[in-house]
Each structure stands twice: as C-alpha cells, then as structure tokens.
C-alpha cells in the first residue's frame, strides 16, 4: 500500500482513539501512562524527544509545534488508550512472541536489526557509543546489549552479536513482555524501527 494511502487508512483509528480518550479524566490517563499534565497538555517522552498532547483535543505535535505524522499519532494515542500503569516485567521477548509477530518477524528484522548492522558497518564499537548516547543501560546479553526506556512504561532492548568467519554480525530488538499491554504489534514494530533509526543517527553524529 502506498504510504499516503496507508496514512489515510489510519485516520478512522485516530478519531476513534481520540473519542475514547476525550471521555476520560486527563489526570488518570496521565497516571496510567507515566506522564504529567501541565497547562492543559500532556508531555510524552519518546527516545530522545518529547511530544505535546493537547487535552481534550488530543492533537499531537513535536516540541516546535509541528503536527506529527499519522503513524506517530496513532502510536501515541494507542499508548494512552491502552495504558493501565503496569510496570515493566524485566522479561525480554522477541518480536515473534508478540501477537501475530511470527508472521511479520522477517520483515521487522529487515528494517530494524539488519538495517542497524548494515548502517553501522557491523561495527560493535559504533553501536556501543550510539547506545550510550541515547541513554541505553548495558544488559548482559549477546556480545553487547543495551536496554532503552523508549516510552515511560515500554522498555526495548537491542542485543548485538559480533560476526566471525562463519556468521555475520547480527542485532535483534527485544521487547519487555509488558509491551503488548501498551501497544498493538504494529505499534511496537514502529517503535523498534524508530529505536534503530535513532541509533543509526546517534552513531553518525559521532
């Protein structure tokens, strides 16, 4: 599906989510999502950026006031609709363990971990520097692993294996088991892609 047609197809979901949220108490939505309410808006941190959510209009903008694209709007609204305050479990799962994730696992790996390794030229040191620049916390997984608090209640991890004569370098995005409470699988796929893109950008700036 062309990108514009796909974005158009998201609009009914966006409007339905806005109606659901507008009927709720802003303070309670914020509490469950790990956010704060300030001056009639919610501020949501996502990776190294933050987004402004007007209440009760539920319009979502970047910090400079620019409107966010539809795929980011539905991700944020889905997070707010589904948030129940559950704490991260500390248990990591692969994309294939998410609902319907097995079917899309190969595609997700292609534009997340595979892209990360390719863009970083399989250089683990560049990955480590980029991960630290994004506030990643080291994990004892793979040859190198880092956890990232991508959304307030949704940690993701990237695990990196160095290549050798038999196998190329590999990176995999993992999700805390609680992630499926907060976002549907398509939203988590977008989140994983955003994390890998941010790592590539962080690596390129150093």
Image (cartoon, rainbow, N blue to C red):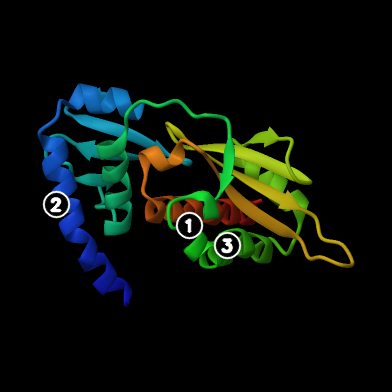
Q: Residues within 10 Å of mark 1 (few under 14, many from 20)?
A: some
Q: Position of residue 79 (x, y in %)?
A: 32, 40
Residue at (26% x, 51% y) in the render: 66
Label 3 belongs to which residue?
109
Q: Is residue 156 left or right of residue 56?
A: right
Residue at (63% x, 64% y) in the render: 114
Residue 39 picture quarter:
top left
Query: Which of 203 and 136 lies nearest the eye of the viewer?
Result: 136
Label 1 belongs to which residue?
101
Looking at the picture, does residue 37 appear above or below residue 23? above
Q: Is residue 7 left or right of residue 116?
A: left
Tell me if I can see residue 102 in this picture: yes
Q: Position of residue 85 (x, y in %)?
A: 36, 25
Q: Could you say which disc has been placed on residue 126 in the image?
A: none
Q: Residue furthest bottom?
A: 2
Q: Residues within 10 Å of mark 3 (few under 14, many from 20)?
A: many
Residue at (57% x, 67% y) in the render: 110
Residue 18 picture quarter:
top left
Residue at (33% x, 49% y) in the render: 75
Label 2 belongs to which residue?
15
Q: Is residue 72 left or right of residue 193?
A: left
Q: Position of residue 74 (x, y in %)?
A: 27, 51
Q: Residues within 10 Å of mark 2 (few under 14, many from 20)?
A: some
Q: Secondary structure at mark 3?
A: helix
């Amino acid at each position: 599906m062309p990108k514009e047609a796909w974005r158009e197809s998201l609009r009914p979901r966006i409007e339905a989510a806005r109606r659901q949220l507008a009927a709720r108490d802003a303070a309670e939505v914020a509490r469950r999502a790990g956010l704060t309410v300030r001056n009639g808006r919610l501020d949501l941190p996502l990776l190294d950026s933050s987004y402004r959510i007007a209440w009760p209009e539920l319009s979502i903008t970047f910090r400079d006031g620019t409107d966010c694209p539809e795929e980011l709007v539905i991700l944020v609204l889905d997070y707010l609709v589904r948030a129940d305050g559950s704490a991260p479990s500390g248990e990591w799962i692969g994309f294939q363990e998410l609902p319907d994730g097995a079917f899309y696992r190969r595609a997700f790996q292609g534009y997340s971990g595979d892209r990360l390794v390719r863009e970083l030229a399989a250089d683990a040191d560049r990955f480590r520097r980029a991960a630290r620049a994004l506030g990643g916390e080291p994990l004892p997984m793979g040859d190198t692993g880092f956890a990232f608090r991508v959304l307030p209640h949704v940690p993701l991890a990237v695990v990196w294996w160095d290549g050798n004569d038999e196998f190329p370098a590999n990176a995999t995005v993992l999700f805390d088991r609680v992630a499926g409470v907060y976002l549907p699988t398509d939203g988590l796929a977008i989140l994983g892609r955003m994390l890998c893109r941010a790592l590539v950008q962080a690596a390129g700036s150093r």
